[in-house]
Image: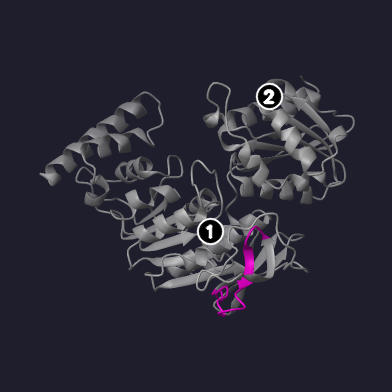
Amino acid sequence: MKKIRFFIALMAAKLARFLLKLLGRNASYLPGEVALKISKDFLGHLKLPETVICVTGTNGKTTVSNLLTSILAKNGYSVTNNSFGSNVQAGVAAALLADSNIFGKSKKDIAVLEVDERSSLLVYPYINPDYLVVNNIMRDSIKRNAHTGFIDYIISSALPEKTKLVLNGDDMITSNLAPQCKNRTYFGLDAEKPEVSEKPFLSDIVYCPECGALLESEYLRYNHIGRMYCPSCGKKSPERDYLCTDVDRENSTFTVSLKGKEHTFNLINDNIVNIFNFTGAIAILSEIGLSVSQIEKGFSQSEIVKSRFDTLKAGKLDVTFIMAKGQNPIACARCFSYAASIQKENKLLLIDIDDLHDNINESESTCWLYDCDYSYLADDSISEIIFTGPRCRDQLLRAVLAGVDKNKIILEPDVSKAVDLIDTEKYKDVIVLYELYRQPDADKMKIQIKNLGEGTK
């Protein structure tokens, strides 16, 4: 009976996909939802590719899964992935059935699947990944992901013992994930170590996961990412098998030690978060058998997707667009930090990070702003900040509390009018930070800024 339900679900989902494509619609979610409505264990009946790689974690899932897919494709592998759709159960199902035949057998060599942390219990029991890459586990929206202990628990509970884990060894939470999985390897970053061990604005792990004593740190880069140890029981961050040892921003390269041998790769983006992402990608590609030359080739031909990071020349304006994740305090703080670090002396920031999906009847939670470190915006290189969107006044309050000079801040609730406030005589360098669900705003702003910079407004 289950088999019959599966085939009915498969045919119905394929029909839904065909009709959506016929209408010019995105078929990256609904076909999967149709299949799961008919057959709850639909994923368990699909005949998967020979190798299944899943990517999860709080930040960096999309970047890593897209990069893996791109590099594998450039080296001749056929890849199923859900980069154009949802990372929850229905999105995973839609991606797999799109590349399967009428019997549910995959037509691809490898599956690279981005999986939302909360979907672990709905995905891994049916799709037993051969490899799981975890970039980090840290606080996210308190409404979506509750607490890091909860996320740790559901991922660990869902994973089969046979899955090989590729984990961020500089994250004490991630590196202790799923102890039942004995086959594990670690990656991390040794380059550009902080000179002093200052306490971060936030830390998502304070006590030793073994004995409960207060953890100490050799150094921390941000949040709890760094090298930690317990002075009581000796628990410490694990040794890393794949280690970034040097970042050469001038020549756009970074060096990674792969099990003791150093190799240099093209640096696609120099944000410290992405350097961790790239090192993790190298680790998994090496683990599944790609040679160093194949990985180097992939990095030399890859770039961050423009919806996440883009640059634009508009007349004399140099504009950088960076996507930030609303309600994700660490991701936003990392974007603020990166914007402050861009080597320009007189910068203007335009910030549009309201979360549209949380705005119901003009009411939403802004508590996440106070978990986000806005002090980076007080950097002297940032001359002016334009906050836009319905919650721009909340942004103003949070920034001022973090030490940002109020005289540097301009408010414009109407996003369509915010670009008009850019003084093209005063500023040459403009950085736009926008929320994940504000991509349409960002696309419009690109056109507006280009017209503004070229004087064709």
Residue 216, given in percent of the width and then of the height, sits at 65, 71
**In this rendering, would 339 be left or right of 283?**
right
| Vertical order, 342 against 195 (above or below) | above
Residue 104, given in percent of the width and then of the height, sits at 23, 47
Mark 2 vs mark 1: which is more N-terminal? Answer: 1
The amino acid type of the residue labelled 2 equals Val
The amino acid type of the residue labelled 1 equals Asn
- Colour option used: one colour
Q: Which residues are magenta?
A: 222-241
Cβ–Cβ below 8 Å for labels 2 and 1? no
Residue 353, given in percent of the width and then of the height, sits at 64, 35
**In this rendering, would 48 be left or right of 219?**
left
Q: Is residue 184 visible?
A: yes
Quadrant that contains the N terminus: top left
* Cα distance in 3D space between marks 2 and 1: 33 Å
Is 443 included in the stretch rendered in magenta? no
Q: Report which residue position mark 1 lands on.
A: 135
Q: Report which residue position mark 2 lands on.
A: 415
**In this rendering, would 449 be left or right of 5?**
right
Q: Nearer the viewer, residue 16 or 250?
A: 16
Location of residue 195 (image quadrant): bottom right
Quadrant that contains the C terminus: top right
Q: Nearer the viewer, residue 177 or 335?
A: 177
> Residue at position x 62%, y 39% from top?
367
| Vertical order, 419 against 208 (above or below) | above
**In this rendering, would 14 be left or right of 403?**
left
Location of residue 300 (image quadrant): bottom right
| Vertical order, 64 against 438 (above or below) | below
